[in-house]
Image: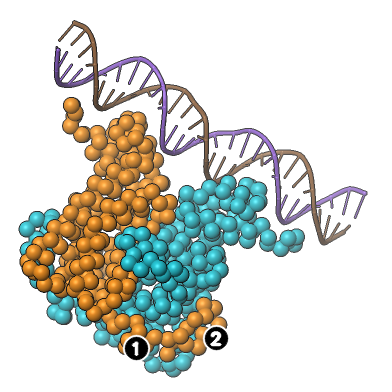
Chain colours: A orange, B cyan, C brown, D purple
Amino acid sequence: MTPHRTSTRTTILDAAEQLFALNGHDNTSMRQITSAASVNLSAVNYHFGSKDGLVQAVFQRRLRELNDERLALLNELESNAKGDALKPSQVLEAFFSPLVLHACSHEPDRRAFVPLLERSMSDPGGFIRAAIIDEHSEVFGRFRQALLKALPDVPEDEIIWRFHFMLGATSYAISGAEALRSAMDWPHPEQKQPESAQVLLQRLMSFLLGGLRAPLPGSGAVPTCSNANHAATNGRSLS
Amino acid sequence: MTPHRTSTRTTILDAAEQLFALNGHDNTSMRQITSAASVNLSAVNYHFGSKDGLVQAVFQRRLRELNDERLALLNELESNAKGDALKPSQVLEAFFSPLVLHACSHEPDRRAFVPLLERSMSDPGGFIRAAIIDEHSEVFGRFRQALLKALPDVPEDEIIWRFHFMLGATSYAISGAEALRSAMDWPHPEQKQPESAQVLLQRLMSFLLGGLRAPLPGSGAVPTCSNANHAATNGRSLS
DNA sequence: GTAGCATTCAAACAAACGTTTGAACTAATC
DNA sequence: GATTAGTTCAAACGTTTGTTTGAATGCTAC
């Protein structure tokens, strides 16, 4: 059947993934990909139908692997708990740690993928986001249920919003090390390594947990204020 | 001097901003922009030099306005405090509320800009990110100092990281209403309006404050665990 | 060996891109 | 009214894009 097994197919996938992460998938031409992979230009259309087909294949390959890890962690947690509710920290770590650990992986291909994923989620063009959220739908449902059970006092609206906020914080945490260093001038430039996975994960987890368990907006514990004007003039507000 | 004042210039800026927000700035051709603006194709090169010049102008126009609002709010807070440290909630609100309120603005042009900004921050191509962080540098410095003063017990590293996490959460909060509704199947589809600015801002603020004031990673309050393997196999961990 | 299928390859395709050109038009200045 | 500078315009420029074509290759099976 397949003479070379799938050599050129995966070669193209690897090269495309790397270039996509570097330049974005629509600032990467097929000629760049096929040159980097040392294959013929037409190979992409032969194996993936079109460039869009290649992009989709790049995402599905890693996304399936990532979500399988998340589900495996959640399954083990729930089977160990024997019906009891999990702790919020357990649910969060099962969902977010595979992502962070991939982002800090030693294999450069895997590491390159995560920022690419985060970036493509905010692409409104749409065909790639549809594929991503389709691949995530089962995982999202499972973790949403687990969170609802872990926090029975928090209304569902709030949980879903906070889960969304956490996704954003994690996204920036991942793509953030060098971006942060250049945005504001980093006070500790002597620190060389890009934040080991462990310490970054701990930083992020304590932040996420703090946000997830924050007092509810209406509870008065947060010094909410009534600043409704978005012109900065006469901005007498902020408690 | 200027016969028509600056009609075509701002017409182009408005059309470009809208199209950039819709399709991203490199999936938008100059022919689309000039058609939408009903001006000649060459007008872009005449008024802005190049397409990159136009992109930069689109960002600078709104960014300057946004950061002026933030600085005005912070200035008033600090002058009212007369040297005392501000409350963390005050600093956060001065920084994030202008962004959220812009994103929920009734003027569609202003509202369209914020997701565009968030998306372009994660563009690695670079020339646009450089412009953005350049425009932000003063604001970042001021707010970082204010946060350091407001939270004297938290080490600087941690504050900067958490500030970064908050940026991510806010980014997702803004671009999130409809994305969230489609990603996981939203449990309350009868809610029509895209979350009024007030309630979204309150949701976000309580989350951000909870994350900002979370116990520090090393303090043991967070059930930290030692899950170092990112293969999901034998993942015995998570406390 | 030869038929048949899967894969690779060089070459060309039409379409779209950002930019440049040089002439037309407008409006104020001398 | 002629001159000048600022602005608009239609047309074309040269590249680069993703895709298609048809011949050449490699491998398996009869």
Residue extending farthest to the front is B190
Question: Which SS class for mark 1?
Answer: loop
Picture residue at 38% right of the left edge, 69% below the top: B173
In front here: B194 or C22? B194
Residue at 18% in and 54% down: A68
Please tell me in which quadrant of the rendered image residue B54 appears.
bottom right
Q: Nearer the viewer, residue A76 or B89?
A: A76
Looking at the image, is B53 positioned above or below residue B167? above
The subunit letter for the residue under badge 1 reads A
Q: Which residue is mark 1?
A: A220
Mark in the foreground, 2 or 1:
1
* Residue at the spot 34% in from the left edge and 88% down from the top edge: A220
Kindly indicate the quadrant of the structure image that contains residue A170.
bottom left
Disc 1 marks a residue whose amino acid type is: Gly
Give the residue drawn at x 55%, y 64%: B109
Q: Decide which of tag 2 and tag 1 comes sooner along the chain.
A: 1
Q: Which mark is residue A234?
A: 2
